[in-house]
Amino acid sequence: MTIVGAYGDGLHHTFLDAAEAHPGRPAIEVGSESLSYGELRSRAQQVAHALVATGGLAKPRVGVLASRSAQMYAGILGALYAGGAVVPLNPGFPHDRTRQMLELAEAHALVADAAGLAALEPLLAAIERPLLVIADDAVRVNELSTRWPRHRFICASADQAGQADAATFAPRPASPDDLAYLFFTSGSTGTPKGVGVLHRNVVRFVQMSQERYRALGIGPEDRFSQFYDITFDSSMFDLFVGWSLGACLCGPTLPEWINPNKYIEKRALTVIDIVPSTGHMMDRSNGWRPGRFPLLRLARFGGEALSADLAARLALAAPNAAIDNVYGPTECTVDASYYRWDRERSPAEALHGVVPIGSAGPGVTLRVVDADLREVPVGGEGELLIAGPQVTPGYWKDAERTAKSFIRLPGSEQVHYRTGDLVRRAPEGAPIPYLGRMDYQIKIAGVRIELGEIEQAMRGASGSDEVVAVGWPLTTGGASGVVGFVARPKVEVAELRARLKEMLPGVMVPKELRVLERLPLNVNGKVDRKALLEALRGEVTA
């Protein structure tokens, strides 16, 4: 099998090539269900055939409302096979937020698993435009067809007439500039922010990953974790890099996710990819005792800053594994730089105990600039800019925001993405240290959060215009939660919290809400966020 493929016909060929090479090998394991590459290919063909035969759309955008199931993987691949783009959705998100994503994406169809079906009816009630819904439960499909006649429902596996056609369905080719994924991240205006990832962006990411990890011998015998939710762009490493190498992808069920350490052992995983916050949770109570994971060959940290202590502890727990710290925003397709942990050298390279973001991946350009977008000298601090084939075209249907964040520097034809991350320019050959965020955007458990979106919800729920959300307690990569401050709300705190839970994903709901008579102001008359944080720090040290 050729490890690095051209994949000129699109991202889905990273899977199809592996399915052609070894159709009988396991492609996924979820709970008690295991599907070979050939079986998963057939399931995906059923979804794709249903999309094409009934929708007749050339390049559909397909929502996948699912949570680690065979139907989820078939839906993702099926959307790509049909020449469409994947819009990943989480059944646990508030219904209104999911509705916003579907409407912003102008999604034509939706693939749902059991968890998705359980969350579906409020969406069907709110969306006027007819949707094609593909599920794998004939009974529920019949019920929903009766209740919601303006939408169309298909159980692809029960469509006997279409089975033969599905078996011979030829996946549609995709051009490099076709949309492959549409991710939605937190938006400062209260509306989710879309990032469209093209086939050429993610194919190059897959190739770059192969180039790095084939040197470790990663291949068909390996077993990858799928700990990330599909709404997190890092999940593309789990799925498409794992499949491109012929490996088996293992997704924990909710009960299994309660103890990921045990899951690693039970499933004999050899490759894991996690955010540092998850690592801290796994390491509690000596969870990462030395030598616990002898089968691990690669462990990747991403999504937020990594502490040197945590990296060192996993290196001891997984003595045969390469430990990578990877860095890259959604706008630059998962990985832009890498840092390989070395127990002898790395502690000295970890500035303030934080592992460097490392060096640019092949074909990636990293620049460190000042406020005037001029490159800083070696040793200087500034904003990190990224250029290269993995940089996406910009924000979905938001030309103004795109123009602010995707720029051309004087004398360069490359488009550079402004990350908003503060780093220090390193000498040639040395890794780049990470210093933190430059704005009020934070990360919680690797999930990027716009505090402005939380504040927008707080205003609507409290009836007060005087609100502030701050990340607290602070961590090396952002915060472990949010504290909300509101002046003179028109509702009680318990009611305010209940309203916010209906408006925001759980990770964005403030862990604590504090009512003030007035918000502190700085000398410019602006809300003094720093004063609020200092007050929180003072409570800890008091």
Image (cartoon, rainbow, N blue to C red):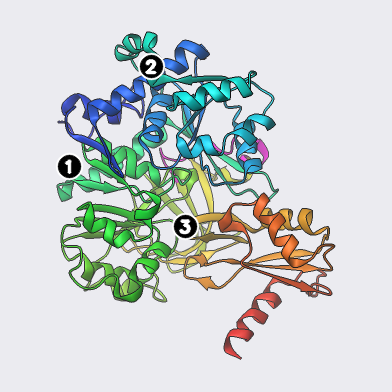
Tag 2: amino acid:
Arg
Q: Residue at x 37, y 18 (%)?
A: 173
Q: Nearer the viewer, residue 524 or 95?
A: 95
What element does badge 1 sit on?
loop
What element does badge 3 sit on?
loop
Residue 415 in view (yes/no): yes
x, y percent for residue 308: 34, 72
Q: How far, Cα to Cα, is label 3 from label 2?
A: 34 Å
**Magenta span of residues:** 387-402
Sequence-first disc among 3 and 2: 2
**Residue 401 counted in the magenta span:** yes
Q: Nearer the viewer, residue 254 or 172?
A: 254
Q: Residue at x 52, y 65 (%)?
A: 478
**Which label number is shown at residue 169?**
none
Sequence-first disc among 1 and 2: 2
* Quadrant of the rendered image containing residue 204: top left
* Quadrant of the rendered image containing residue 151: top right
**Residue 11 counted in the magenta span:** no
What element does badge 2 sit on?
loop
Q: Badge 1 local density, few (<14 within 10 Å), some, or many (20+)?
A: some
Q: Quickly name the residue at label 2.
A: 172
Image quadrant occupied by the C terminus: bottom right
Q: Quickly name the residue at label 1.
A: 219
- On screen, residue 524 above or below 171: below
Q: Badge 3 local density, few (<14 within 10 Å), some, or many (20+)?
A: many
Tag 1: amino acid:
Gly
Q: Residue at x 50, y 27 (%)?
A: 140
By secondary structure, the bulk of the magenta-drawn segment is best described as loop
x, y percent for residue 56: 51, 11
Q: Quickly name the residue at label 3.
A: 446
